[in-house]
Image (cartoon, grey):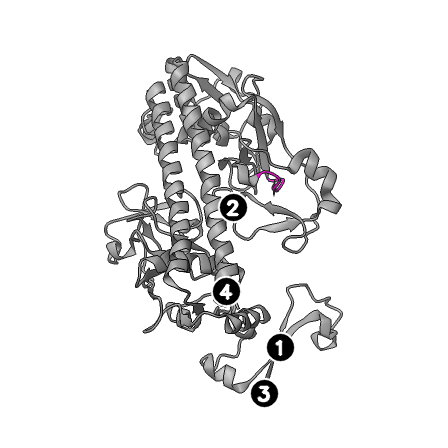
Amino acid sequence: MVNLKAQKPAEIPRTVEPTELPEDELRWCTVSLNEVLQQSSRLEASVFDIEGKHAREALKRCKWPIKAVSGQNGLADCYHRPRFKRIWVEKSDLPIYQPSQITEINPKPTAYLSSLTGTDIDTLRVNKGQLLLTCSGTIGNCTYVGNTLNDRIFSHDVIRITCKNEIDSGYLYAFFKTMTGQALIRSNEYGAVVSHIEPEHLEHIPIPDPPYILKKRIHDLVIHSYILRDESNAMLEQAKSLLYDALKLPPIEKLRPHYFAPNVGLRNYAVRLSRIDGRLDASYHVPIVDAILSRLEKEAAKITTIGDPRICKRIILPGRFARVYMQEGQGTVFFGGKQLYELDPANKKYLSFTKHGDRIKRELLLKENTILITRSGTIGKVALVPAHWEKWVVNEHIIRVEPASPDIAGYLFVFLSSEYGHQLIKRYTYGAVVDEIDDRHVSQVAIPLLKDLKIQTEINRLALKANTKRTEAYNAEQEAILITNENVIHAT
């Protein structure tokens, strides 16, 4: 027998040697030599993690036959691309997306590749119907490739999964989203500093093989969820297009801000003393902001600010606080700015309502159609709260903007989430090490009102309808996961 012990994430006091820890401070299990050999003689404790062992035991009790995720008799073929040296350019027709973005509803490119990059770029593209699984750093995040992601370029740190039968794609996705699926994936990770899994590890992950009709029911719910996401994204693109047409806005990279003395070899500009506004940081006065405001003034009926009572009821900047977390299901769902673009935020935590009840009610609790803006670190990520986020909580690094009414909420979101709105938010950034903005800055962000009220109303309607579809997509996915748990994994 091989006895493997893994220390809990909790810190060990430096004055106490690890050997002196009582048993309840350790997560441990006993592993047979046969189990070690079945796992390719791996001795990492994570391979035999208690959660993973419980997951495998649950599948042994499952009444359905068990297959492997991949391999000769598995449900899917899995692969990833080799590492390559990247050649970056400022803009090209080869945008690339990172593994951390696969859970976003509508990811935007983080960088652009040069066509001179020394790899077969087309093999980096993902195809509709595939599943993507993160295999480095944060392990096990999964998505289905619908219209939104189809043909987009992803880095090598994503496992591409192509199911042998079409209906298995939605079913396998739902399985990976369950706690059982996640525990099995994590039990295969390796790496002392950065965690990894490889495509061949999926050959060792067991999965129940229920009847066709049950798998198809799960598959159809997942596909329906992703169709709704695609429709939501299309509506927001339509709303953005209407906004740009109404204000006659070109793509922002085509704006030509005026710089002072362009022949000196670096960007520089002059600012009148009357326009300093008490700010001596160059980013506040960057000419792109003047170019944007000049363009808006020409075509808007009026330019107001978020702080205008016609636009916003109130702007909330929560104070910092020491958090008390609970186990899943025992507290209020809690997440941060990193998950703001996700339908169902990954790595959710659970905040104690007993300890933080007053603060949660007063300034943290989310309401439908509230606009969220990240204020620290990455500035200006914008999200519109969908119905299924109500009663959830986001952290104090996110400013809440409560629109004056549903009649302006969608329009306000579309403008603030545009490239133009982002620049107007970002201009207020301050901080020598960590970038920050606060509620006063947000209240001063310029908002154009359209001359044609019907177009403004239509933009608002499209945004709110898109937000409704996102909640419908969430509900469909949750139903698929529930069926997978109750009727497949735990069916005995």
Q: Amino acid at mark 4?
A: Ile
Q: Where is residue 350 shown, x and y percent of the image? A: 64, 50
- Of circles 2 and 4, which is in front? 4
Residue 394, magenta (yes or no): yes
Res 106 quadrant in image: top left
Q: Magenta region: which residues?
A: 390-397
The residue that disc 1 covers is 29
SS class of the residue under badge 2? helix
Q: Are marks 3 and 2 in contact (CB under 8 Å)?
A: no
The residue that disc 4 covers is 489
- Of circles 4 and 1, which is in front? 4
- Of circles 3 and 2, which is in front? 3
Give the mark, 3 or 2, whose residue is nearer the N terminus.
Answer: 3
The residue that disc 3 covers is 1
Quadrant holding the N terminus? bottom right
Residue appearing at x 56%, y 74% in the figure = 45
Residue 227, magenta (yes or no): no
Give the mark, 1 or 2, whose residue is nearer the N terminus.
Answer: 1
Give the mark, 4 or 1, whose residue is nearer the N terminus.
Answer: 1
The residue that disc 2 covers is 339
